[in-house]
Image (cartoon, rainbow, N blue to C red):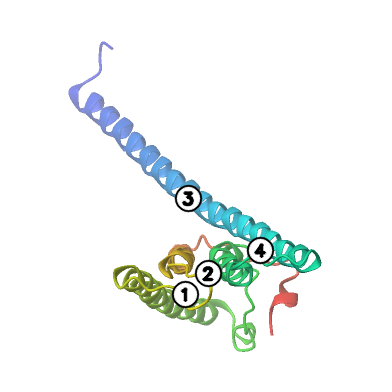
């Protein structure tokens, strides 16, 4: 426009670029948040499928006994599916605030002291979850490398059921790190409804 100096145009351009950069950062953060939530939901859905498989194994075993038919491996596979469902549901359960927490000390604190304790607890939990995930993945890999099989009559390669444990613990570690970062940024949502039912 006539009358506008170079300095004014440069300032307007910088402001537009700054707004674009902020919008991109927000979009990127929203994309990461959505991807993480989908990961937790997918793990929970897989855990639910494992529970359905567990029910099918139990029903197959019961029906087999009624008709004097023996289906090999039903008990072992029921155990594998139950363990897999438990591990795969860990992260989703954590994000919904359904894990049992001992909050006796935490409830006695307020303000910065409470937040500091929350950060310390989440940091320690993240480290422990990472160690758990590392050794679970290592165990699964070693079972694959050494061709370990079940000692039961199903003779299943052990790395297959152990893979669910490795994936579940890895997602749990991601969830704990997610919670730690959210608490650090002051954006962590705490579950208030029915909280006392899950605390000791």
Label 3 neighbour load within 10 Å: few <14, some 14-19, many 20+: few
Residue 59 horizontal side relative to residue 84, left or right = right
Label located before the other in sequence (3 or 1) = 3
Front residue of this view, candidates 58 and 81? 58
Label 1 sits on residue: 150
Q: Nearer the viewer, mark 2 or mark 3?
A: 2
Horizontal and vertical percent for residue 137?
37, 70
Q: Nearer the viewer, mark 4 or mark 3?
A: 4
- Per the model, the C-alpha gap separating discs 2 and 3 is 41 Å
Q: Judge from the rendering whether residue 38 lies leftward or rightward of residue 5; answer left or right.
A: right
- Mark found first going from the N terminus, 2 or 3: 3
Write down the residue under mark 2. 154
- The picture quadrant where one finds residue 197 is bottom right
Query: Which element carries disc 4, helix, strand or loop?
Result: helix
User: Which picture quadrant has residue 24?
Assistant: top left
Above or below, 145 against 116 in this view is: above
- Comes first in the chain, label 4 or label 2: 4
Q: Identify the residue position indicated by label 3 in the image.
A: 33
Q: Residue at coordinates 59% horizontally, 83% vertically from top-left?
A: 106
Are discs 2 and 1 less than 8 Å apart at CB?
yes
Q: Nearer the viewer, mark 4 or mark 2?
A: 2
Q: CA distance from mark 4 to mark 2?
A: 16 Å
Q: CA distance from mark 3 to mark 1?
A: 39 Å
Q: CA distance from mark 4 to mark 1?
A: 18 Å
Residue 177 shows up from this direction: no
Q: CA distance from mark 2 to mark 1?
A: 7 Å
Establish if 76 lies above or below 120. Answer: above
């Amino acid at each position: 426009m006539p009358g506008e100096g170079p300095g004014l145009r440069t300032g307007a351009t910088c402001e537009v670029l700054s707004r674009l950069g902020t919008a991109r950062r927000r979009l990127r953060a929203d994309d990461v948040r959505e991807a993480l939530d989908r990961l937790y939901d997918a793990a929970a859905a897989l855990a639910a499928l494992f529970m359905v498989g567990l029910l099918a194994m139990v029903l197959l075993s019961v029906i087999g006994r009624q008709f004097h038919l023996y289906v090999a491996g039903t008990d072992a596979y029921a155990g594998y599916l139950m363990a897999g469902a438990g591990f795969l549901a860990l992260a989703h359960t954590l994000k919904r605030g359904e894990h049992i927490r001992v909050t006796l000390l935490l409830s006695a604190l307020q303000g910065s002291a409470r937040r500091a304790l929350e950060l310390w607890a989440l940091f320690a939990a993240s480290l422990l979850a990472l160690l758990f995930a590392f050794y679970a993945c290592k165990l699964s890999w070693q079972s694959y490398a050494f061709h370990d099989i079940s000692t039961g009559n199903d003779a299943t390669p052990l790395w297959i059921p152990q893979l669910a444990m490795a994936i579940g613990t890895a997602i749990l570690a991601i969830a704990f790190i997610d919670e730690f970062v959210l608490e650090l940024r002051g954006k962590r949502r705490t579950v208030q409804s029915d909280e006392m039912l899950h605390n000791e």
